[in-house]
Image: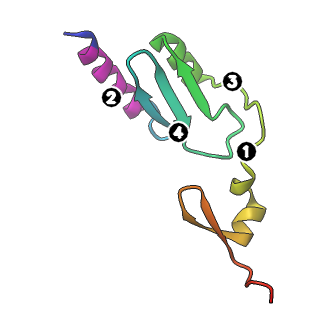
Amino acid sequence: MTTSDTDAVLLAMLKARYGDQWNIRRTEHLWLATAKDPDTDNAPTIVQPDVEAFVRELENPPPRAGRPSLLSSSWAAAHFDQAGDGAYVSRRPPMT
């Protein structure tokens, strides 16, 4: 089995185990996971070159370093509709 075959099997296993909480992918040199919950208190992204360190962080993610995006806040959700990826439209009518 080649390294890429092994990585493909590991990726499938990780997605099966952690896929409900994380979007997981693999580059040539890195394992990457992004949290599916934008309001998580944990780090929203995990990047590791070593699969064992990667799994340890999936099991016990480090704390979030900053606040979640203001666009994911309840206030923004009450005032704006998402029109596309990164695009929001105000619910307020234009002022005349």
Q: Which residue is mark 1?
A: 68
Q: Residue at x 74, y 63 (%)?
A: 76
Given this view, does label 2 or label 1 mark the residue nearer the observer? Answer: 1
Which residues fall within the magenta stretch? 4-17
Q: Main secondary structure of the magenta part?
A: helix
| Label pair 3/4, CB-CB below 8 angstroms | no
Q: Earlier in the sequence, mark 2 or mark 4?
A: 2
Choose top left, top right, bottom left or bottom right for residue 42: top right
Question: Quick check: 34 left or right of 11?
Answer: right
Q: Position of residue 57 (x, y in %)?
A: 58, 20
Q: Which residue is mark 3?
A: 62
Q: Which residue is mark 2?
A: 12
- The quadrant in which the C terminus is found is bottom right
Question: Quick check: 86 left or right of 78?
Answer: left
Q: Position of residue 3 (x, y in %)?
A: 27, 10
Magenta residue check for 45: no
Q: Position of residue 23 (x, y in %)?
A: 47, 37
Q: CA distance from mark 2 to mark 4?
A: 15 Å
Helix, strand or loop for disc 3? loop
Tag 4: Cα neighbours inside 10 Å, few (<14), some, or many (≥20)?
some
